[in-house]
Image (tube, grey):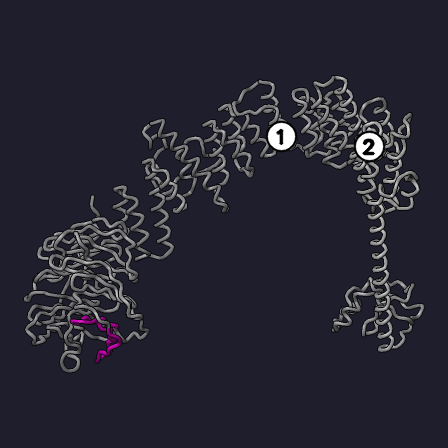
Amino acid sequence: MTLKAFDLVSVLDRVDLKIECFEASGNDLYLGSEDSIVVHYLVEERTHDTTGKIFYSTNKMSQKNLGTKKTVVQLKTASALGRLMVLSDGNMYLLDSDFLNTVGSGPKIKNVTVFCVNENPNTVDPFTVQLCVGKRRCIQICSLHEDRVSLLKELSTPEPVNIAMDGNFVCVAGQGHYSVFNVESGTSQDLFPYEATSTYPHVKRIAKEEFLLAGPGSLGMFVTAAGISERPPIQWTEGISAISYYHPYIITITNQFIKIYSLIDQQHKQTLNFSGGELVGNFDGQLYVAANSCVSCLMPQPWTAQVQTLMDSERVEEAVELAEHSGAVGMSQEQYHQLCHTLLQKAGFIKLVHGVYDQAQDYFVRGAVDVREVISLYPGLLPSSVEFMRAQPPLHQIADIAQAMHGDQTKIEEAKSFLNSYLLYLRSLGEPITYRMEIDTAIIKLQGEKKSPELLSFLDNGDIVCNLPECAQWLEAHHQYSPLAKLYRVLGDLDKSLEVLTRLVRDEINDEHFKGIQELVDCLICASDPNVVWRYSDFVLDRNPVEGVRVFTETKATLDPSRVLQVLQRYPEARLRFLHHLIDTKKLQDEKYHTELVLHYVDEAVRLIFEGPASSEQLEEVRGKLQDLLTSSCHYSPQPVLARLQGTTLHVETAAVFGRLGEHEKALSMLVHQLKDFSAAEQYCIAQTKGANDTSKSSIFLKLLKIYLRPPPGGCADDVELAPAIELLSVHAGDLEVSAVLALLPPSWSLSIIHHYLKAALRNSLHQSRIKRIQQTLVRSENIQQKFILYKLCKDMGPIPLAANRICCVCNGGFSSCEFTIFPNGVMAHPTCAPNPSVCPLTGTVFQVSHDDARKSRTKKQYSG
């Protein structure tokens, strides 16, 4: 089915001359003949009283014979100037547009082959017309005034056959080649060649800096001023004598037909019979076509009628593009936008019926369709509480989706999948959504019916607004109990959610998406009421203690830890996890919790020791946890732990407990004599002296040295740990007081044994001495600076009396010392009460402070009264 874009209406049935060119402006029509005659007609559009059809009445106003006996090649009006430009025999004449009188004497420009008017002129003067004139070896840019033509610029080019101008650009069809010239810069851009013997080089301006050219192979080529093509070419017929542009159509004329092509999709849209056609032109919206002796008008059909024709034939892409490219012709912007929205909505429903879902969604979104109009096609998805009537006039003739898909279940399921994705897309836009309740209800029903695992993810996102009773009934009818429980939970009805989950755990009902006790725990965690937690805690713990303890560690409710531990008495592993939660996460410092956790690991380590080598890996892991706990925690009670460790081989742990009690010698003796772990002994000293002063640090390291240098209980003098003692002296020379070390060393030791220690100790002593001297010098320097500041202040300001009853203006306290801050306005304050020396704390007055004063403000000011 072709589109009826134009009607052909006769204007002049027959004239007594052979028409070679024509021009129109408003109601004025000008014809140029082959024998140098120009005729002016007044054309009026009328409507028949009975038939309502449009017809034209014409009246010959004037006629002019140029006297050249040559063909009138071109006519062009300059309506603002009341002038008509005429090209004949290489001469361009300027005539009065009303009476065709010659302006001035003779032609205005000679040796002209072709000319055109700049349809996008650079001038701001409305009473001048910019021309481009083609001559044998150049083109000239001219400015036409009321009675003269002035030359602006000239560019060299081979003889132009046809030209068109837009702004600073001139498209020139030369002898077998197209080019684009930049008038401003004088540069040119070659386009493509054409066969001069078989192709007439049509050149037509289409849009800003874009031209339509007759290309090879009967192609209409679109070219920009930059020399590129941004649209596909038009494949038109051979023998085209003229072309014109009427948005959004390209009109071509041959000896037999007028053919219409769309600029939007470059496709042929309409053909009109027109015998002997030679000329076609768009004169400010008035389309004329001409044969040798007659003129007709192409009357455009209203674009709304064209759009409706396309929609009736379901050519929705063409209809939409035509509407979007037509603009609000003949209507207000509001009416135009409403019509476009309606068109897009109708297009969406047509695409939906044809199963082209991506385009359907695009049209629905662009047309801002009422989402209920789409949901209503799917029975049962709209909440029964919603009173919805479809649009009037109707946007479609679809009863429901089953009727639209002719009962094909596969297509129906595809249509439901489309609706689901479309609704999810609307929710993802991040804008306030109209009819949110209807959208969420439909999504839940669609995914519940499909038993889609995506429903759980959708509910996990939260922010659900739906008709809960209907959704719950729908999910239960489709045995979607896990999503049902989650829906209840998301919407805040925890009791019903827990009830459904409990039935699932007991296997009273089944759901393939149910993940087990974990879901019940996840729901229970959300409860802020402790009674709800206590009610279900035993039920969960009996089935999975490890998962069940999360009820207590992650709950939002406030629970008594003691009661929780009492409940967990029957579940050792869960109790252990809860103790770790209290200590590691909640950072509780209660002694009983820390002690119980330590004792648990002690008992566990002892049990694994008795089980033998088979449990060595587990034992190593448990001992690591126990040692970390003994080291990091200072809140456990050491006595019961020590009592539990007595008689075991857990010597490292026992040493840690001795350290907790401050019995460092016992701890170090155990590490050195029983474990022979000198590295552990050294690390013990380092750990115990963290943050301690030099005296305490030296005391612990001296204890270790003493243990190294004396034999173990029951040992002989040769059993001393000589090597670790020497290494301790070498590594920790700075931590050991020299005099105490010398008093401990055996008199039999030679100097060579301890010379490394002595060198390091003396170096450290010398370093400490120098540091103290530097500190003394800095303190003395600061004291001198303070004295100088005080001297200068006393010299500049004199003594400042400080009465006994004088108080600080900020804290109203007295001055217990001679340290105070005084401002130029006499206000006095403690230095700590007035930290900013440039702002009075009482009045808020800002004083200028010099660099010296700012420096002084960083020290405390002392004034003697």
Q: Nearer the viewer, mark 2 or mark 1?
A: 2
The residue at which mark 2 appears reads as 656
The residue at which mark 1 appears reads as 522
- Closest to the observer: 215 or 528? 215
Q: Is residue 412 left or right of residue 160?
A: right
Please identify the residue farthest to the bottom as the structure is shown: 105
Dot 1: element: helix
Write down the region rendered in magenta: 130-154
Whether residue 131 is in magenta: the answer is yes
Q: Residue at x 84, y 24 (%)?
A: 644
Instruction: Tell me the distance, in whole angstroms, between the alpha carbons under discs 2 and 1.
Output: 40 Å
**Location of residue 663 with respect to 204 vertically, above or below:** above
Q: x, y (%) of residue 769?
A: 86, 55
Q: Residue at x 34, y 35 (%)?
A: 355
Q: x, y (%) of residue 786?
A: 85, 68
Would residue 95 be seen by someone viewing this image from the given angle?
Answer: no
Quadrant of the rendered structure where residue 114 is?
Answer: bottom left
Whether residue 349 is in magenta: the answer is no
Q: Quadrant of the N terminus?
A: top left
- Closest to the observer: 834 or 449? 834
Type of the residue with mark 1: Asp
Numbered badge on residue 321: none
